[in-house]
Image (cartoon, grey):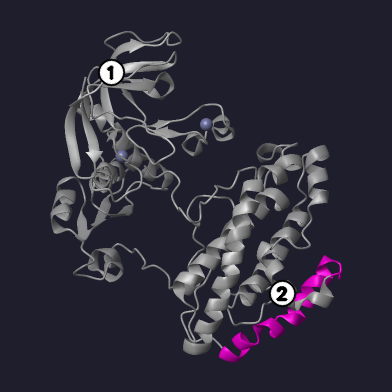
């Protein structure tokens, strides 16, 4: 068959290739239309690490069934189909929960990041598992069907947004996905749609497709522009009052620290290792008093935010009664916040003395779990084991964080300011620690924290 092969970066060549082979669960599809994703363009120029040549790209396509494996019983040759781009295994922990986009063994059609190479649909034929395939209605053309993946992104975004009839919506970005989102939000009932983009041509097209207003932040301050103001869209709150961001992906525990955009107190920074002692001793008494003597050097331990929390009682209650008593949850939440404030203070990220009850710069939250519905009974017994890969990575990241904090110490003494990149890194390590804690010790969720999620913020990226 003929295929468009990415031989090396910036070199696409039409070549003769053997037809793909199919397994018992697979279907051989004759490709009739295939979209070019923005990620394929970045694959072509090599700016992502996810299109290692040689590779046939293309993951949003439609075509007709040619042949299928022995286990496929509900299709016939000639059926018109489209397919998802994520090939999930259907057997791992995430797949069994329906979170197939997090599948441990997932591959993506037309993508090769190193661990796997999966040829895509810039070819006459492509092999696709039956479980990610959908039959097309007759009135949908192949070209339209090839767009379904992109359309679904816009529709999903709108589905996640509470919109009532007559609302005003702002869509940031007017590329292909943005333009589809504009159309989806119109269909959802928004009366006014404000498109924001830095490219005037794209903004013109957004008006053709249903946007009612446009804002180009290059020429106007988007937050204070006339359409935004007249529509009652409030500008984003100043950083200090911002809600805690999810931190890369939607994990039940959220954590963020306000960046101190000011001169930090150099004297208290210089002697932080001593000023931490009183509060560390206080915290140690909560743990039962055994750590008081070495309080100063033990500040690092608070990074875990897991000191003195109720673990064993919760584990026993879950195991025998499927219950997470509310006041234990309250205790664990408040104590986790408190120890994180101490850790943040020790890492020099704030110069206000840690409060026992005020939130200060540290925003940490996790929901009260419905133990009967959301938490498995036996899993807490083995969670500590499952999380071993996290401990290993965190061990090294924490060493890195200690050196980063020492670097920040010098920076603050000389300039008064915390280097933002260092701040973000340490914040990320804290967040990661907290999420592992939430999973293994706080036991508030069964969701396995994504490994490296804080370093690669978007696990679903194509
Ligand atoms: Zn794509
Ligand atoms: Zn899986």
- What residue occupies the far bottom of the structure in this picture? 267
* Residue under the point 25% across and 30% down: 146
- Pointer 1 or 2: first along the chain: 1
**What residue range appears in magenta?**
266-290
Q: Is residue 279 above or below residue 252?
A: below
Q: Any magenta on residue 275? A: yes
**Residue 77 appears at what percent x and percent y?**
29, 8
Q: Tell me which image quadrant ligand 1 sits in.
A: top left
Disc 1 marks which residue? 19
Q: Indicate the secondary structure of the residue bearing disc 2.
A: loop
Task: Name the spot of residue 174 as percent of width and height, x first.
Answer: 23, 51
423 vs 132, nearest the viewer: 423
Q: Which residue is mark 2?
A: 356
Mark 2 packing: few (<14 Cα in 10 Å), some, or many (20+)? some
Q: Can you give x and y, in whole percent of width and height, for residue 195 in the image? A: 24, 55
Q: Tell me if 409 is positioned left or right of 417 in this view.
A: right
Does the closest atom of ligand 1 sit within 8 Å of the Cβ of label 1? no
Q: Quadrant of the N terminus?
A: top left
Residue 101 vs residue 215: left or right?
Answer: right
Horizontal side of 394 relative to 103 (left or right) equals right
């Amino acid at each position: 068959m003929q295929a468009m092969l990415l031989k090396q970066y910036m070199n696409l060549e039409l070549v003769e290739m053997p037809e793909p082979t199919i397994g018992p669960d697979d279907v051989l599809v004759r490709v009739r239309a295939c979209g070019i994703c923005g990620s394929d363009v970045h694959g072509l120029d090599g700016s992502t690490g996810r299109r290692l040549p040689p590779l046939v790209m293309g993951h949003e396509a439609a075509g007709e069934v040619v042949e299928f494996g022995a286990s496929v019983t509900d299709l016939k040759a000639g059926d018109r189909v489209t397919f998802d781009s994520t090939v999930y295994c259907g057997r791992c922990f995430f797949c069994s929960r329906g979170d197939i986009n997090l599948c441990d063994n997932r591959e993506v059609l037309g993508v090769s990041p190193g661990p796997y190479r999966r040829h895509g649909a810039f070819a006459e034929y492509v092999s696709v598992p039956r479980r990610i395939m959908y039959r097309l209605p007759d009135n949908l053309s192949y070209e339209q069907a090839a767009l379904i993946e992109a359309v679904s992104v816009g529709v999903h975004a709108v589905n996640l947004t509470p919109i009532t009839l007559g609302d005003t919506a702002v869509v940031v970005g007017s590329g292909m996905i943005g333009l589809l989102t504009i159309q989806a939000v119109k269909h959802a009932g928004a009366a006014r749609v404000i498109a924001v983009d830095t490219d005037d041509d794209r903004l013109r097209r957004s008006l053709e497709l249903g946007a009612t207003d446009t804002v180009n932040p290059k020429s106007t301050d988007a937050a204070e522009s006339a359409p935004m103001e007249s529509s009652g869209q409030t500008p984003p709150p100043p950083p200090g009052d911002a809600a805690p961001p999810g931190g890369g992906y939607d994990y039940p525990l959220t954590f963020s620290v306000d960046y101190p955009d000011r001169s930090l107190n150099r004297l208290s920074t210089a002697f932080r290792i001593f000023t931490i002692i009183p509060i560390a001793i206080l915290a140690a008494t909560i743990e039962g008093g055994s750590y008081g003597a070495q309080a100063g050097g033990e500040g690092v331990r608070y990074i875990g935010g897991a000191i003195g929390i109720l673990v064993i009682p919760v584990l026993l209650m879950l195991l025998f009664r499927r219950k997470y008593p509310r006041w234990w949850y309250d205790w664990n939440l408040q104590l986790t916040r408190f120890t994180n404030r101490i850790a943040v203070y020790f890492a020099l990220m704030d110069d206000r003395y840690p409060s026992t009850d005020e939130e200060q710069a540290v925003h940490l939250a996790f929901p009260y779990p419905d133990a009967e519905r959301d938490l498995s009974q036996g899993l807490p017994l083995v969670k500590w084991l499952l999380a071993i890969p996290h401990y290993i990575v965190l061990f090294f990241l924490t060493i890195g964080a200690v050196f980063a904090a020492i670097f920040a110490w010098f920076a603050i003494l000389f300039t008064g300011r915390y280097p933002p990149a260092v701040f973000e890194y340490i914040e990320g390590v804290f967040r990661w620690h907290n999420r592992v804690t939430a999973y293994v010790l706080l036991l508030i969720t069964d969701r396995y924290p994504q490994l490296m999620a804080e370093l690669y913020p978007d696990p679903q990226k194509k």
